[in-house]
Image (cartoon, rainbow, N blue to C red):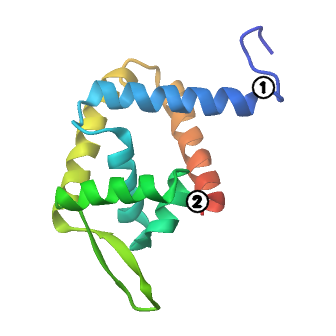
């Protein structure tokens, strides 16, 4: 282990910090035109299907009023819609609209360009390592998020 390598006890903190910093860098370089919360919420709804506001708040680790504010803004922009939850008349399910899915695809293209410029400079071995790490992290998220 080199002096810059994290010890096993430091790895969780380093991963969390570096992932957060990389996410902000990607958003800045990609000029997606919205905050990362907006495209993250639309991406989550698009990936998982209709969600209740409480589920969105839980996934985003925000209060329900904050989630309501974000969803209201996204709804006003035509990116998501609410529909009655057939299993609970007191709740609504939030889903992406066709415009939301199209905007998400555009954001992803912008991220690919913005981040692609950084990644294309890396050696093939580093790219393979990052691809494997991304798959591992995605598996962890899928297994434990929600």
> Residue 58 versus residue 122: which sits nearer the camera?
58
- In the rendered image, residue 93, in percent from the top left (x then y), is placed at 38, 76
Residue under the point 32% across and 70% down: 95
Residue under the point 34% across and 31% down: 27
Quarter the N terminus occupies: top right
| Label 2 residue SS | helix
> Residue 126 versus residue 6: which sits nearer the camera?
6
Residue under the point 23% across and 52% down: 105
| Label 1 residue SS | loop
Residue under the point 51% across and 66% down: 55
Q: Is residue 44 left or right of residue 11?
A: left
Q: Which residue is mark 1?
A: 10
Sequence-wise first label, 1 or 2: 1
- In the rendered image, residue 23, in percent from the top left (x then y), is placed at 44, 33
- In the rendered image, residue 58, in percent from the top left (x then y), is placed at 56, 59
Check disc 1: other Cα within 10 Å, few if <14, some if 14-19, many if 20+.
few
Q: Which residue is mark 2?
A: 142
Specify the quadrant of the image occupied by residue 10.
top right
């Amino acid at each position: 282990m080199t002096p810059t390598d994290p010890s096993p006890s430091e790895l969780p903190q380093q991963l969390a910090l570096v992932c957060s910093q990389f996410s902000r860098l990607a958003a800045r370089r990609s000029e997606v035109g919205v905050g990362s919360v907006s495209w993250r919420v639309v991406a989550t709804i698009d990936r998982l299907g209709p969600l209740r506001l409480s589920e969105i708040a839980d996934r985003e680790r925000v209060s329900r009023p904050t989630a309501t504010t974000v969803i209201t803004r996204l709804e006003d922009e035509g990116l998501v819609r609410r529909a009655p939850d057939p299993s609970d008349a007191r709740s609504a399910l939030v889903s992406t609209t066709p415009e939301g899915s199209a905007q998400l695809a555009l954001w992803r293209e912008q991220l690919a360009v913005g981040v692609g410029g950084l990644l294309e400079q890396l050696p093939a071995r580093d790219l393979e390592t990052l691809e494997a790490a991304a798959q591992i992290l995605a598996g962890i998220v899928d297994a434990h998020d929600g």
